[in-house]
Amino acid sequence: MAKDLLRNLQAPALATMLAKAGAPATRSFDPFARYLPHEAWLEQRLHGKGQSGDNAPTPTVDRMQRLGLSVTEGTWFLLNPVHIHIARDHLVLTDRRRLPLEESESRALFEAALPAFAESGKTIVYGTADTWFVRADDWQTLETTTPDAACGHNIDIWMPKGEGERAWRKLQNEVQMEWHEHPANGLREERREPPVNSLWLWGGAKAGQSAPAAAYFDDTSDLAALLAQAQQPVVIALDALSEPALAEEWGGWLERMQLLDERWFAPLLTSLQRGEIAQLTLISGHNAALREFKLTPRALLKFWAKPSFSRLMP
């Protein structure tokens, strides 16, 4: 569907920048890896290290610190409350962005899970409604998968592997049973919302992990503010396309691309034209590759390069 999508895509600023950028560099990845290409890129860019074998990135400690949670010792994992649905002959992880979870619901489910974790000798810490943390020093070699890499697939091959996997499955099963008839899930069913019926464990990291090498901002940030305070290269990760792409809702994907163009690509193009940005690198990706486009103000002088999305094609 790529050609049809690009034919209907309304993102003139992005089309201009793609056409005027230098020859793109493409890097291929294993489509069955435990992480998506852009997640591996962020790990390398922000922490100065590549992936350790076939294992999920390790942003856990960074996220805890951003939430003001003290991390001085131990190995910590991310813990996401999730919905796992039954397909014809296997279990599938639902995109957690499609699991609206109120603070009160999350807190109630967290409290219900506490005894099982305490019994197993594990400490869990509440972060936000959709992100908790667990300390598990004896699981430090456990290989885990990011939720986006596992989303939409048979979860069996994406479950944690290695020392501690049986202990985790036992603990996960105990929490699932505790939540099965929990009042919070009863209320969700009344609202015809999917129940929170499991936990996804990933991203083990040791306390004291080195701080990020560069600033990291998500798509809620303001570009003008970023440019004003930037003393070093700024990383902006725009995640708005992941949800419709994982759900294969291409109408929504087109709408979000248009919004990204209005909010981000058009202002970035203007800043390049004014010389406010010395160099801009655009990195796009899917489940098996990354493509990198580099731009400078001088590159915009290529008057013969007509706006086009053709460089996004495989």
Image (cartoon, grey):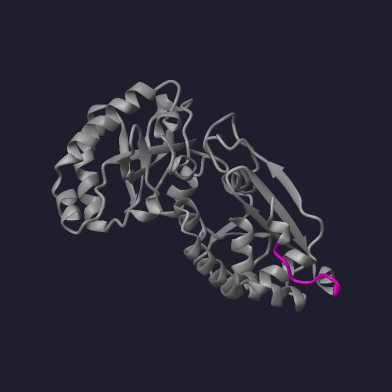
219 with respect to 50 (left or right) = left
228 with respect to 208 (left or right) = right
Is residue 250 something one can see in this rendering? yes
Picture quadrant where residue 162 is located: top left
242 with respect to 110 (left or right) = right
Q: Where is residue 263 in the image (x, y as percent from the top left)?
A: 57, 74
Front residue of 44 and 212: 44
At horizontal 79% and vertical 72% (from top left) the residue drawn is 306
At horizontal 47% and vertical 45% (from top left) the residue drawn is 148
**Vertical relation: 77 (above or below) 195:** above
Q: What stretch is highlighted in magenta?
A: 302-309
At horizontal 49% and vertical 65% (from top left) the residue drawn is 251
At horizontal 45% and vertical 32% (from top left) the residue drawn is 158
**Vertical relation: 79 (above or below) 13:** above
Picture quadrant where residue 9 is located: bottom right
Front residue of 274 and 134: 274
Q: Position of residue 229 (x, y in %)?
A: 62, 69
